[in-house]
Image: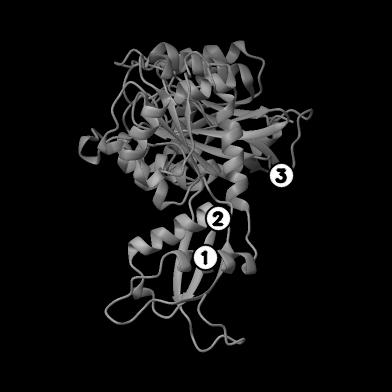
Amino acid sequence: MQLPHVVIIGRPNVGKSSLFNALIGRRVAIVEPTSGVTRDRISYAFECEGRWIALVDTGGMGIEDTTELAPRIEAQIRRAVSDAAVLVFVVDAQAGITPLDEHVAGIVRKTRTPRVLVANKVDARVHEALTAEVFSLGLGEPLPVSATRGRGLAELRQAVAEALPEDNVVTKKPDEGLKLAVVGKRNVGKSTLINALLREERLIVSDVPGTTRDSVDVRFERAGKCYTAIDTAGLRKRGKLENAIEFFGVHRAQRSVRRSDVTLFILDATADITSMDKRICRYVVDEYKPCVIVVNKWDLAKGVKVGDYQTYLESRLKGLHFAPILFVSALRRENLWPIIDVAESLYEQSCEMVATAGLNNVLRKAVAQRLPTGRGKKEGKIFYGTQVGSRPPHFVLFVNAPKLFSPRYRRYVVNYLRDHVGFEEVPVRLTLRMRSGRHPHGRKPV
């Protein structure tokens, strides 16, 4: 069952995103005093008075966006309002009622959706008198709240719960399914790809660099299975970040990679691999995330052969040499569903466990093929290994001295394990530990 949507609306700079974060108890939406920070609809599932809802943050109504995105932002807001089970209309008690507040109030009146009127920024008792002006909107008694101070949040949750329809009650946490973080540089087609998978304009798409700012979770289903695609801000060098909004967008993109099950690394087939692509590659590798390299705009790469491009990628993105590569066109919706199939396969690989006996047989063959280099006259010895975890597959090798194993030899062992124990396309984590005491069975080196 779809969660009922509780949609926060209002003019710019009334504290909608602050209220969104305060209600869910997490910093999900970017909060900045700059007008028009929020563009896409940001949704987050949380439990409200025993019922699960999807709380939705929206852009400011009537925003004057210099990048000509205002019509698209307004379209996102209209769609959110039409899908809402409850509207939370927010005004700024300290600023008073403005013509834009009146405009939003007119939209709210035309709907039959249950609503909760919130007077935000009532930070202290002295501000409570300011709520009297809000009665002029003709939408009933406002609820005094301070998103930044946490005042009135319990009362707001209660008011939202009472306004929810009784024919859509969800008491269990919804399944997020496979979480897919969609990452890449600016303008490589991340939002276009997600829209193509959903077959709707769920995310704002524009040629304007940096259109996506927040990380946006979008839940969808395919063949009875649930998935969550996480759209992220386009990444670029730290020195080129223009403001705090971009900084927070990058931070949230990195957090999206960490909380994902599989990362979709999007590249533009018409552009060269840059140092930023390499940095993204390194971050994904360092987080040990299964990764699908998605080469978008392949329809525009005239005269380029698949084999040649794969060789080019392997030479430029060496840390992801094991990751599968798919060539797609998000705009034309070509070859998109194989992305989901491959992502599922990678996730299943990352969950597998290897029996200790089989693992040590493979380690014996690895050592027989190539001995540890050691240092001076002292040789490195591997006594035995075991898998201690999955997602990512994590192997611990007990050795005589970890410092005797060079980074190059460690990479050799990782690659050998990947090729021989069923982890051909996912990252493998390797830890070397000094064996303490004798093995209970007097085990010799593998």
C-beta proximity under 8 Å, tags 3 and 2: no
Answer yes or no: is residue 27 visible: no
Q: Secondary structure at mark 2?
A: helix
Give left or right: position of 285 versus 361: left
Q: Nearer the viewer, residue 46 or 311?
A: 311
Q: Residue at x 48, y 64 (%)?
A: 366
Residue 190 at what x, y percent from top left? Answer: 44, 26
Q: Label 1 sits on what residue type?
A: Lys
User: Which residue: 40% across, 36% down?
Assistant: 30
Q: Which residue sits furthest right?
A: 167
Q: Residues within 10 Å of mark 1 (few under 14, many from 20)?
A: few
Above or below, 170 against 133 in this view is below
Secondary structure under the numbered disc 3 in the rendered image:
loop
Is 381 situated above or below 365? Answer: below
Q: Position of residue 277 (x, y in %)?
A: 32, 36
Q: Is residue 405 visible?
A: yes
Mark 3 and mark 1 residues within 8 Å of each other at the beta carbon: no
For label 2, the residue is 420
Q: Say which of 358 and 330 sits in front.
A: 358
Query: In 3D space, how far apart are the residues under numbered discs 2 and 1 (Cα atoms)?
Result: 10 Å
Q: Quadrant of residue 50?
A: top right
Distance between the Cα atoms at labels 3 and 1? Answer: 56 Å
Question: In percent of the image, x 71 and y 28: which residue is there?
Answer: 223
Sooner in the amino-acid sequence: mark 3 or mark 2: 3
Residue 50: assigned label: 3
Residue 365's disc is 1
